[in-house]
Amino acid sequence: MTTTAVLAPEQAHARLHELTVIDVRTPGEYASGHLPGAHNIPLDHLDEALSALRSVADRGDLLVVCASGARSARACERLAEHGITAATLTGGTSAWTQLGHDVHRPTGARAVWAMERQVRLAAGSLVLAGLAAGRQWPRVRLLSAGIAGGLVFSALTDTCGMARVLAKLPHNRPRATDLDATLATLAE
């Protein structure tokens, strides 16, 4: 297993001017507030950006961020597989904002819930629907059991299949022009 370099929020804050920051959250999460100067490349589009990220890493230090640090750690491992060195932000943007550091929000951008909140809403709704429908059709309770099992598996493995599914919803997907613009900016 690859060891990922980490920067504490205070370290990243002190070095922000010399770091290239890549935010691997969904575009909706990114729009809700990101580190100053961060570029949005959602985790599931990381492979498309490998060439641009390689050239950025050759010119300076790369910091990968997400909400908690889990997705950015996976991104750093993926980058390391391709010979690209990057660090992740300990505690992610959540820790960054808890320390009172500034976040930028695009003007006019519609805020989207953080992925964790989207997962809690979807999981809770499915469990309630399974329990309610299970009163009429007992087998439907298996839906609630399946969601509960998925949440336990998610906690044990620090992965989330539901988040991967929700990331494919239109409000969580980057427009091709946005991703192309980000990659062009990084190539400069």
Image (spheres, rainbow, N blue to C red):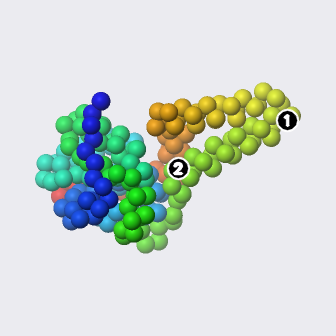
Q: Using the rendered view, name the quadrant where residue 23 is placed.
A: bottom left
Q: Relative to 64, is 147 on the left or the right?
A: right
Nearer-the-camera pick, 122 or 178: 122
Residue located beneath label 1 in the image: 135
Which quadrant: the C terminus?
bottom left
- Please report the residue visible at 46 percent of the width from the left and 37 percent of the height from the top: 158
In the rendered view, tell whether residue 39 sits above or below residue 47: below
Query: Measured from the top left, where is residue 94 in percent x and y?
Result: 43, 58
Snapshot quadrant of residue 113: bottom right
Q: Amino acid at mark 1?
A: Arg
Q: Position of residue 148 (x, y in %)?
A: 64, 35
| Element marked by disc 2 | helix
x and y percentages locating residue 140 in the rendered image: 76, 31
The amino acid marked with disc number 2 is: Glu
Q: Are the two marked residues, 2 and 1, in contact with CB atoms closer than 8 angstroms?
A: no
At 57% across and 46% down in the image, what residue appears? 119
Q: Nearer the viewer, residue 108 or 85?
A: 85
The outermost residue toward the bottom is: 107
Where residue 116 is drawn, which disc sits there?
2
Q: Earlier in the sequence, mark 2 or mark 1?
A: 2
Quadrant in which residue 145 is drawn: top right
Quadrant containing the N terminus is top left
Horizontal side of residue 183 vs 66, given as left or right = left
Q: Position of residue 123 (x, y in %)?
A: 63, 43
Q: Farthest residue in the top direction? A: 139
Local packing at callout 1 (Cα closer than 10 Å; few below 14, some 14-19, many 20+) is few
Query: 128 left or right of 24?
Result: right
How far apart marks 2 and 1 lie (CA) works out to: 29 Å
Question: Residue at position x 13%, y 53% from top?
Answer: 59
